[in-house]
Image (cartoon, rainbow, N blue to C red):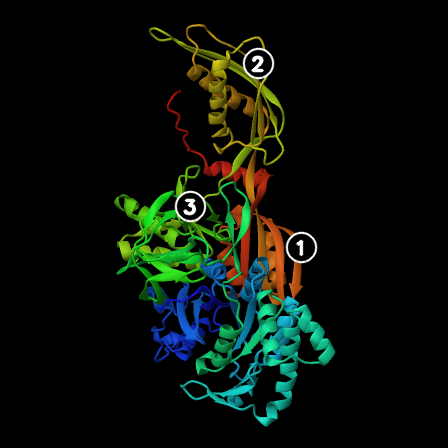
């Protein structure tokens, strides 16, 4: 069946770990029709947790996609991981969806990942709702958790459904929008009925609040509401659509996913009121480099964004695409814009978890899968040949945990490299690079769990043994005062010899300015055609400092004099003279070591605040500030990278696994004394290879 842009809805289900996202996804497919019988996470048979590592660990590791039909609408649901280690797949779902549904535990309320996800959605101005799950538990409290949401996010959630009873007395939910009750029916679907009289007052109060939310979506409706005190059902419906599309309204839903409770009001609301793709926008860059907001539009030529790449042992490479404009059809030829290569679209699919369902086309706003693409990668733009738009890549956080890795057997290094390249393509928060400074292959990701799962998968799939260790820190060297030096390179062999003399002065630059070359030669002491050789020599000299052979930064080099020979001079002669002159000058300029300092944002429950701050102080950290709201604290700090190499493990230990953090490079800072001595000692025996001396 083909769907139009108007009939598509895209929803991201996200939340803190263990809030019931996969269970809700499974039960929505059951309530919506595609699934005859829902499974539990414990069974290892759910639609969305289908990879061996997910089944083994009983957690979501990858985003999964499924869809239901409701009221002539196709609703695409993304089930996303709750662990911060796999946040990349949450972010791709936020990019592809027009509505985010945050699951909140009806017992514990807002948790750390809820806060981080909310902030990400705020940055996107993305419409969202909250589903309060597990309300059948004795500890659950719908009103208390709603109040906590309001306190933490300064937004008042408006109930679209609310529970009837709790714990053993939990009976189901009241649908405020449609004025119905939905009763729990054992393992079956909800039973519809009238609102019980005992809940009539609560229903009327909630209905009034929903009408107010609808009035806030439109100025004309607000005037009518003020004048008449109410709105017609049609006006209420229109107002809610507009208010939610503009993110002025935070709908709240009640339920217990495991008991199939609260699903009907949720599905009906998304189908009737939830934001659709039409009119939504995605960020793109024109051929001239200008950023624009490109509207989702079925009437324009094809443009689509690859949001994810995965590999299936039977179907091969799968490219997940969100169609922004036009129509994507099977057997179509389109342009991969970043690669500037034609791409023949073979078969096209939608899916229910791992089960692919072939389709002929996808309309603007829809999400689907291209199989066995020759050129497509995550973040690529696919377009009609006459389009020059290129969509901006996913906004992903920087990795926070790194490990150096190598194959135990040298013969397996190529296998390891190929596997790491593929892993980095499947998960864009995972990075892989060879660090020439430290001579290590370093992999980086969002946490120890993510890294371990990737390495375990490689070991099992490739049948190779791997070795890991804490990576070395890439230090820098710089100078603290001005100095000068000269060096004459002279070499006589049969025939032409080598001759070049260089006189230079060096001086410190402000931190972060790296390098500046000034040619102050007058009178032709060094001919112009040899100046590039001088600069090459300086750059080579800066590649390995004089203290511990780390790269040199933040230095101004002024070439002030020199001498050449009309026969024996060459660019090579001046390169070698400049390299040695620079190193001699650096020895005279009081060199010092620099270490990378990181900006750290730590999210913890307030009860752990003191322990975390004490730990950061012990790591030579500088606390920049902290903010607390609703029991969750955010700490801003600057900490040397050398102290953070195992911080994901340390923080997990301090906070019983509840803490979370983001990290980004801040600057380089000088180190001296015992710390510098230890760094220099670790570089003893480091050999600089230079072939043209």
Q: Quadrant of the N terminus?
A: bottom left
* Residue contact between numbered discs 1 and 3, judged by CB atoms under 8 Å: no
| Residue at numbered disc 3 | 386
- Secondary structure under the numbered disc 1 in the rendered image: strand
The answer to whether one can see residue 256 in this image is: no
* Residue contact between numbered discs 2 and 1, judged by CB atoms under 8 Å: no
- Secondary structure under the numbered disc 2 in the rendered image: loop
Residue 589 lies, in percent from the top left, at 59, 25
- Secondary structure under the numbered disc 3 in the rendered image: loop
Q: Quadrant of the C terminus?
A: top left
Say whether disc 1 or disc 3 marks the residue closer to the N-terminus.
3
**Marks 1 and 3, Cα distance to the nearest angstrom?**
51 Å
| Residue at numbered disc 2 | 521
Q: Quadrant of residue 245?
A: bottom right
Q: Quadrant of residue 354?
A: bottom left
Residue 551 lies, in percent from the top left, at 50, 33
| Residue at numbered disc 1 | 625
Residue 395 lies, in percent from the top left, at 51, 53
Q: How many marks?
A: 3
Which is more toward the observer, 564 or 74?
74
Say whether disc 2 or disc 3 marks the residue closer to the N-terminus.
3
- For label 2, the crowd category at 10 Å Cα-Cα, with few meaning under 14, some 14 to 19 and many 20 or more, is some
**Marks 2 and 3, Cα distance to the nearest angstrom?**
52 Å
**Marks 2 and 1, Cα distance to the nearest angstrom?**
50 Å
- For label 1, the crowd category at 10 Å Cα-Cα, with few meaning under 14, some 14 to 19 and many 20 or more, is few
Query: Residue placed at 51% from the left, 74% from the top?
Result: 272
Residue 595 lies, in percent from the top left, at 55, 40
Q: Is residue 4 above or below residue 495?
A: below
- For label 3, the crowd category at 10 Å Cα-Cα, with few meaning under 14, some 14 to 19 and many 20 or more, is few
Q: Nearer the viewer, mark 1 or mark 3?
A: 3
Which is more toward the observer, 678 or 111?
111
Say whether disc 2 or disc 1 marks the residue closer to the N-terminus.
2
């Amino acid at each position: 069946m083909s769907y139009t842009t108007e009939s598509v809805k895209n929803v991201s289900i996200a939340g803190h770990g263990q809030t019931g996202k996969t269970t809700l996804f499974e039960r929505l497919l059951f309530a919506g029709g595609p699934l005859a019988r829902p499974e539990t996470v414990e069974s290892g048979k759910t639609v969305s947790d289908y990879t061996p590592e997910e089944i083994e660990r009983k957690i979501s590791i990858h985003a999964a996609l499924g869809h239901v039909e409701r009221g002539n609408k196709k609703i695409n649901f993304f089930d996303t991981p709750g662990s911060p280690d796999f946040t990349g797949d949450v972010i791709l779902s936020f990019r592809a969806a027009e509505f985010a549904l945050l699951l909140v535990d009806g017992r514990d309320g807002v948790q750390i990942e809820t806060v981080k996800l909310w902030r990400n959605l705020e940055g996107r101005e993305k419409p969202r709702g909250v589903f309060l799950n597990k309300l059948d538990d004795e500890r659950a409290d719908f009103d208390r958790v709603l109040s906590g949401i309001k306190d933490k996010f300064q937004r008042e959630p408006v109930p679209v459904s609310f529970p009837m009873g709790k714990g053993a007395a939990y009976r189901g939910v009241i649908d405020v929008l449609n004025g119905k009750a939905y009763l729990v029916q054992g393992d079956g679907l909800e039973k519809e009925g009238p609102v019980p009289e005992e809940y009539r007052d609560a229903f009327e109060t909630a209905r009034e609040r929903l009408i107010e939310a609808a009035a806030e979506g439109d100025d004309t409706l607000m005037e009518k509401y003020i004048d008449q005190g109410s709105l017609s059902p049609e006006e209420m419906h229109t107002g809610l659509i507009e208010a939610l599309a503009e993110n002025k309204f935070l709908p709240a839903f009640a339920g217990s996913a495991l008991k199939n409770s609260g699903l009907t009001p949720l599905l009906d609301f998304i189908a009737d009121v939830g934001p659709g793709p039409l009119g939504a926008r995605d960020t793109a860059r024109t051929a001239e480099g200008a950023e624009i907001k490109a509207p989702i539009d079925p009437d324009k030529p094809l443009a689509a964004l690859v949001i994810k790449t995965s590999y299936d042992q039977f179907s091969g490479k799968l490219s997940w695409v969100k169609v922004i404009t036009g129509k994507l059809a099977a057997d179509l030829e389109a342009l991969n814009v970043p690669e500037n290569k034609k791409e023949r679209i073979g078969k096209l699919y939608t899916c229910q978890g791992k089960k692919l369902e072939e389709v002929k086309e996808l309309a603007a706003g829809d999400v689907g899968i291209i199989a066995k693409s020759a050129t497509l990668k995550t973040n690529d733009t696919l377009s009609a040949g006459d389009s020059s738009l290129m969509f901006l890549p996913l906004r992903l956080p920087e990795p926070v945990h790194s490990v150096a890795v190598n194959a135990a057997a040298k013969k397996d290094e190529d296998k390891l490299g190929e596997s790491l390249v593929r892993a980095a393509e499947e998960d864009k928060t995972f990075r892989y690079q060879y660090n020439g400074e430290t001579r290590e292959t370093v992999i980086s990701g969002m946490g120890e769990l993510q890294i371990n799962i990737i390495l375990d998968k490689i070991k099992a799939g490739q049948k190779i043994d791997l070795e890991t260790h804490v990576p070395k820190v890439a230090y820098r060297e710089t100078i603290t005062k001005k100095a000068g030096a000269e060096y004459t390179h002279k070499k006589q062999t049969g025939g032409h010899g080598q001759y070049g003399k260089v006189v230079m002065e060096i001086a410190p630059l402000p931190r972060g300015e790296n390098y500046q070359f000034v040619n102050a030669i007058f009178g032709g002491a060094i001919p112009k055609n040899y100046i590039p050789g001088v600069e090459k020599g300086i750059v080579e000299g800066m590649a390995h400092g004089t203290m511990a052979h780390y790269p040199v930064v933040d230095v101004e080099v002024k070439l002030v004099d020199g001498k050449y020979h009309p026969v024996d001079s060459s660019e090579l002669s001046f390169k070698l003279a400049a390299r040695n002159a620079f190193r001699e000058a650096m020895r005279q300029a009081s060199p010092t070591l620099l270490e990378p300092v990181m900006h750290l944002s730590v999210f913890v429950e307030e009860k752990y605040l003191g322990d975390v701050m004490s730990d950061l102080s012990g790591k030579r950290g500088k606390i920049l500030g902290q903010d607390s709201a609703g029991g969750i604290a955010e700490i801003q700090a600057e900490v040397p990278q050398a102290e953070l190499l195992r911080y994901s493990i340390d923080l997990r230990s301090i906070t019983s696994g509840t803490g979370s953090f983001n990290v980004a490079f801040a600057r380089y800072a000088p180190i001296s004394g015992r710390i510098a001595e230890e760094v220099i000692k670790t570089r003893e025996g480091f050999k600089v290879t230079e072939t043209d001396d």
